[in-house]
Image (tube, rainbow, N blue to C red):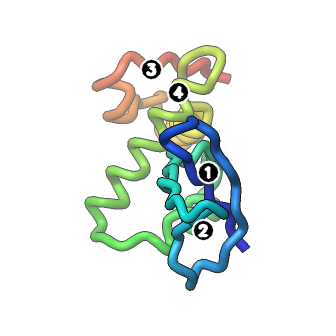
Amino acid sequence: MPQYTFLNEETGQTIDVIMSMDENHIYIDNDGKEWSRVFYVPQTSVKDKLPTSEQEFAEYSKKRKGNIGDLTDLSRDLSEKREKESIDGTDPVAKEYLKDWKKSRRKGAKHSIEQSKSFDIVAE
């Protein structure tokens, strides 16, 4: 059952009361004084694990609604988050993809992403 906080505005005293969600969230003390309910901003934070493979991206995005453009935007946003979290400032997933793409092409042709961004790929 949830815990609710109430404030006696005359004294500044607060009290935590456990109540059912179905009850009226009102607290009246022994003297008949009704206390004000205190509302808090939630302080929890859940950090998503950023997908690093096609399977993880499919799992991450399967419950989201939208069209193919929304998925493209989501992919770009996740790439930018991985760039910010990485030590060298590049997205390791994109870096690996571009390295593999370059190996599969003749003469090491560059992908259009490499041409539009300053993306340094170490040829191995």
Q: Earlier in the sequence, mark 2 or mark 4?
A: 2
* Quarter of the C terminus within the rendering: top right
Look at 40% across and 29% down and name the residue there.
110
Write down the residue under mark 3: 119
Residue underneath mark 4: 83
Q: Residue at x 46, y 29 (%)?
A: 107
Instruction: Judge depth for marks 2 and 3 and give the one in front.
Output: 2
What is the number of the mark on residue 51?
1
Q: Label 1 is placed on what type of residue?
A: Pro
Type of the residue with mark 2? Glu
Q: Are marks 1 and 4 in contact (CB under 8 Å)?
A: no
Q: Which residue is mark 2?
A: 59
Q: Residues within 10 Å of mark 4 (few under 14, many from 20)?
A: some
Q: Is residue 47 visible?
A: no
Q: Label 2: state its secondary structure.
A: helix
Which quadrant would residue 88 be assigned to in this image?
Answer: top right
What is the three-letter code of the residue carrying label 4? Glu
Q: Earlier in the sequence, mark 3 or mark 4?
A: 4
Vertical comparison of 13 with 33: above or below? above
Q: Which percent across, then down, holds residue 91?
A: 55, 31
- Return the disc, 2 or 3, that comes first in the chain's sequence: 2
